[in-house]
Amino acid sequence: MKLDPIAVSKALAARGESLAAFDGRCILAGCVAPPSNTPGILGRRALPARRLARLGATPHFHHGLLGFICATGAAFFLVASAGALETSRSNAVSQRPSRPLRSNVACCESDSLAAGQPRQATTRPADDTDVHVLPVQGNVYMLVGGGGGNITVQAGDEGVLLVDTSVEQLSDNVLKAIRSVSTKPIRYIINTHVHADHVGGNAPIAKQGAMIEGGNMGQPYRGAAILAHENVLHRMSAPTGQQAPFPTEAWPTDTYFTKKKELFFNGEAILMLHQPSAHTDGDSIVFFRRSDVLSAGDLFVTTTYPVIDLERGGTIQGVIAALNNILDIAIPKDKQEGGTYVIPGHGRLSDEADVLEYRDMLTIIRDRIQDLVKKGSTLEQVQAARPTLDYDGRYGAAAGSWTTAKFIEAVYRNLAVKQTKSQ
Ligand SMILES: [Zn+2]
């Protein structure tokens, strides 16, 4: 079934939107942009060219933005804005209901992706404390909002399990959101790492839960169990007599120091897999095997370059290795979006193609900086060479807590140390 580009164009124009591409050609008067083989942009998200080819689609740029077209001409996705996506969906995609379009998910992202412009550090108003629930698949939901880290909820007959708890001040709204999913007790909290935007709600949320115990154990602690890698406990606590960075009630109650920890809850195998020296030194990814959803913590985010917390044992090599481990686990649906879903630490719901693109980007930047380090460049020279330039429009930030300059510096420091050691 072929789309009528003129009709779609008119429908879009009525909404103040523009049609950018059809059948590989831009039909807008005056547009001279040729079809491009470089990665296309779908719903404000980059897709690797390889993935597009697998979908049988031709990527096409229109003035630096925009979508791709299926070889059949039967469907196309374009992204002048969320409004255009909606229009093209109602005009065109409704004819092919079997093709999932994750526009609702794509729209979670900020609108600040202007070609080549670094995104502003703050993408949502500071007073937005709403916590939204997104059903992912199987038993798993994603809680998003308020500027804290994303929370994963797994719910079933045995109760509720959370991955991370966001910032402390959101706890009331997080609990409300959890209650909209399940009224069963919160049994487990898994922490992906130590940062306050992921463990901040541990104490107030765990207090509302109840550990599973057998017999007359008479335990004084009655809240939910908190699980994490051992290094998370080390970082949250302090030796006797010293001030700990987090209150005792927020600390993990159960830790592991091996490669993985296994759990079976709500009829589902759950794997916690330690990713050494990556975002921090205590990162876990959490894989829900039956639901086929993976929580990546801050090893994968869709909003910025990865934060490499040098002070807490983070390294660029570790982040790339962790992304490769995620890619090993994730399996995409054949020629479609989805399959294994990946919940990032920050940003929108993703799948394997998103992680792959992010891994490729980091590998390219790592290699560029590595090359400069080998040539003996100083940090200033590396910064001046702008090794991230082509990705700054998507992930860069000039202000805020994690700027492009800080990211480059962290990668440089990792690689420069390695270089000195190997000499
Ligand atoms: Zn973090």
Image (cartoon, rainbow, N blue to C red):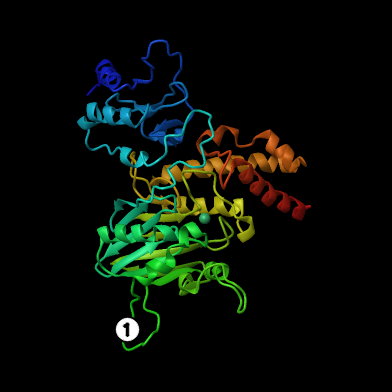
Q: Is 82 left, or right, of 381 in this rendering? A: left
Q: Is residue 328 left or right of residue 414?
A: left
Could you tell me residue 254's position as x and y percent? 46, 74
Q: How many numbered marks appear? A: 1
Quarter containing the N terminus: top left
Residue at image point 53% right, 41% down: 360
Left or right of residue 246, residue 239 in this image = right
Q: Residue 86 lies in what quarter of the image?
A: top left
Asked if one can make out residue 129 in the rendered structure from this viewpoint, the answer is: yes
Task: Using the rendered view, name the quadrant where residue 201 is placed.
Answer: bottom left
Q: Is residue 315 positioned above or below 262 on the image? A: above
- Tell me the SS state at disc 1: loop
Task: Work out which residue is located at the far front of the displayed protein and give it.
Answer: 127
Q: Is residue 89 above or below residue 162?
A: above
In the image, residue 380 lies at what x, y percent?
73, 39
Vertical side of 248 occupied by 270: above or below: above
Closest to the observer, 247 or 232: 247
In the picture of the structure, the residue carrying the numbered disc 1 is 214
Residue 273 is situated, as x and y percent measured from the top left of the image, at: 47, 63
The residue closer to the viewer here, 159 or 222, is 222
Residue 85 picture location, percent across and down: 31, 30
The yes-or-no answer for disc 1 within 8 Å of ligand 1 is no
Q: Amino acid at mark 1?
A: Gly
Say if residue 164 shows up in the picture. no
> Compared with residue 373, is residue 226 higher up or lower down, i.e. above or below?
below
Residue located at (30% from left, 23% from top): 73
For label 1, count other residues whose C-alpha is less than 10 Å away and answer few (under 14), some (14-19) or many (20+): few
Depth order, front residue of 106/14: 14
